[in-house]
Image: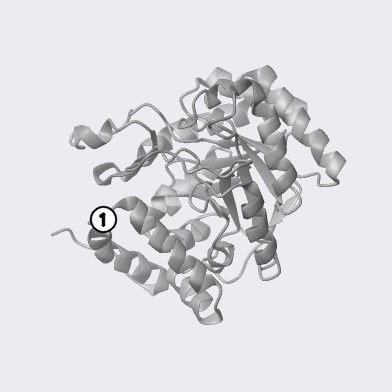
């Protein structure tokens, strides 16, 4: 039997060790079922004072915060939740109680959609990674906006809410810009920032939007709509790790030139580079995007490339492979301003949040 983590001291370390003990039981069940149960529990806990206290203890997040400004917004810390975990914005009060500085909810589309057929989420424990082909399943932008609006009155100061938007699967690629505009119109009034997801591998042809002129038109459309609605919001664009460095830098420059505030590096990966040979082939080769530890090196490479070429002209959110406080610190060292967690939470539990916050100034 494996030994638990060394140096178990304090609430955060106890939480990590406790989750390490519980994880084998959790991993006996279908990952999507466990995800839904987790979301239900987190939503319920966030609605009660006692539940919020338990969440704060479980994460071990520092109670004192040193606010910072990124993209014109004030964040209470640099660590946030990545898009895809809370697609409909159901548990914002729970995420805040866990100590996050921000949460990016979504990706939502203008109309509700069920996503891909199940099973569509798979664990690769040897690699601390996941493969998913969820297909942007969500209840629609209007429903997410309602959830965010209801949660606003009880969210702490400095907790930022971002909303990731995309197009519906049934929408022809020629009408994609109209879909983004429709989703933006619904969520911009309640979001602190909006992320344009043009890199999900599970919506046909979506990644074809990662072209300089298309990104520029998309940004110009959403920014103009924001001015029309009097809901001007910082806009981020989420890019794929499968693109080469030069293309990512070129797209980041297009974001700057069109008035966007930053990029999110990165989304899930179609390739399986970095996955260990002992990982069971049937799951490793399931169609879908790969997330987790194998993405970390690529995430850091792209952050360095974009920061090196563009300097401080835009903000960078690191998203991909962050599974420890050391990883989070490495992302900031590479040039990121903010860091998002997702797959790391599946393998490390809520104590990862406190660990990452403590490791990042």
Query: On screen, 351 above or below 84?
Result: below
Question: On screen, 94 above or below 304?
Answer: below
Q: Residue pushed farthest bottom?
A: 50
Q: Is residue 22 left or right of residue 172?
A: left
Is residue 70 visible from the viewing direction of this image? Answer: no
Q: Residue 206 appears in which quarter of the rendering?
A: top right
Q: How does the figure colour the protein chain or chains? A: one colour
The C terminus, quarter of image? bottom right
Q: Position of residue 45 (x, y in %)?
A: 49, 73
Q: Which residue is mark 1?
A: 27
Q: Does 354 appear above or below 88? A: below
Neighbour tally class for label 1: few under 14, some 14-19, many 20 plus, Cα within 10 Å: some
> Which quarter of the picture shows residue 20?
bottom left
Helix, strand or loop under label 1: loop
Tell me which residue sits at (64%, 27%) in the image: 176
Q: Quadrant of the N terminus?
A: bottom left
Left-right relation of 282 to 345: left
Of 255 and 204, which appears nearest the observer?
204
Instruction: State the image coordinates of residue 284 (x, y, percent, origin top left).
Output: 26, 34
Q: Toward the viewer: 356 or 208?
A: 208
Left or right of 212 in this view: 3: left
The reply to whether residue 308 is visible in this rendering is yes
Whole-percent x and y of residue 14? 35, 71
Please say if 206 is above or below 9.
above
Q: Where in the figure is residue 122, as x and y percent of width and height?
A: 31, 43
Identify which residue is drawn at 64% across, 50% down. Answer: 162
Determine the residue positioned at 73% across, 51% down.
73
Residue at 48%, 35% in the rendered image = 300
């Amino acid at each position: 039997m494996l030994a638990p983590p060394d140096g178990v001291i304090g609430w955060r370390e106890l939480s990590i060790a406790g989750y390490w003990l519980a994880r084998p039981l959790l991993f006996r069940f279908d990952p999507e079922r466990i995800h839904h149960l987790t979301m239900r529990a987190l939503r319920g806990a966030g609605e009660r004072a006692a539940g919020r206290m338990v969440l704060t203890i479980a994460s071990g997040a520092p109670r004192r915060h040193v606010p910072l400004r990124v993209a014109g917004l004030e964040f209470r810390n640099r660590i946030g939740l990545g898009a895809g975990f809370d697609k409909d914005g159901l548990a914002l009060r729970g995420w805040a109680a866990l100590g996050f500085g921000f949460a990016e909810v979504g990706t939502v589309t203008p109309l509700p959609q069920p996503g891909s057929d199940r099973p569509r989420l798979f664990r690769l424990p040897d690699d601390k990674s996941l493969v998913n082909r969820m297909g942007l399943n969500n209840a629609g932008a209007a429903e997410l906006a309602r959830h965010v609006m209801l949660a606003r009155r009880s969210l702490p100061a400095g907790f930022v809410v971002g909303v990731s938007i995309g197009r519906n699967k049934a929408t022809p690629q020629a009408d994609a810009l109209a879909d983004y505009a429709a989703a933006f119109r619904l969520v911009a009034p309640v979001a602190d920032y909006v992320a344009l997801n043009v890199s999900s591998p599970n919506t046909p042809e979506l990644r074809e939007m990662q072209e300089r002129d298309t990104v520029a038109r998309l940004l110009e459309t959403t920014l103009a709509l924001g001015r029309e609605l009097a809901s001007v919001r910082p806009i981020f664009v989420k890019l794929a790790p499968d693109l080469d460095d030069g293309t990512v830098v070129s797209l980041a420059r297009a974001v700057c030139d069109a008035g966007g505030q930053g990029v999110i590096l990165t989304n899930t990966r179609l390739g399986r580079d970095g996955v260990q040979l002992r990982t069971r082939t049937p799951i490793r080769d399931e169609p879908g995007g790969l997330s987790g530890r194998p993405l970390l090196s690529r995430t850091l490479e792209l952050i360095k490339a974009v920061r090196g070429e563009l300097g401080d002209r835009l903000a960078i959110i690191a998203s991909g492979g962050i599974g420890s406080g050391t990883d989070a610190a490495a992302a900031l060292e590479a040039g990121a301003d903010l860091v998002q967690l997702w797959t790391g939470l599946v393998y490390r539990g809520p104590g990862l949040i406190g660990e990452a916050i403590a490791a990042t100034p």
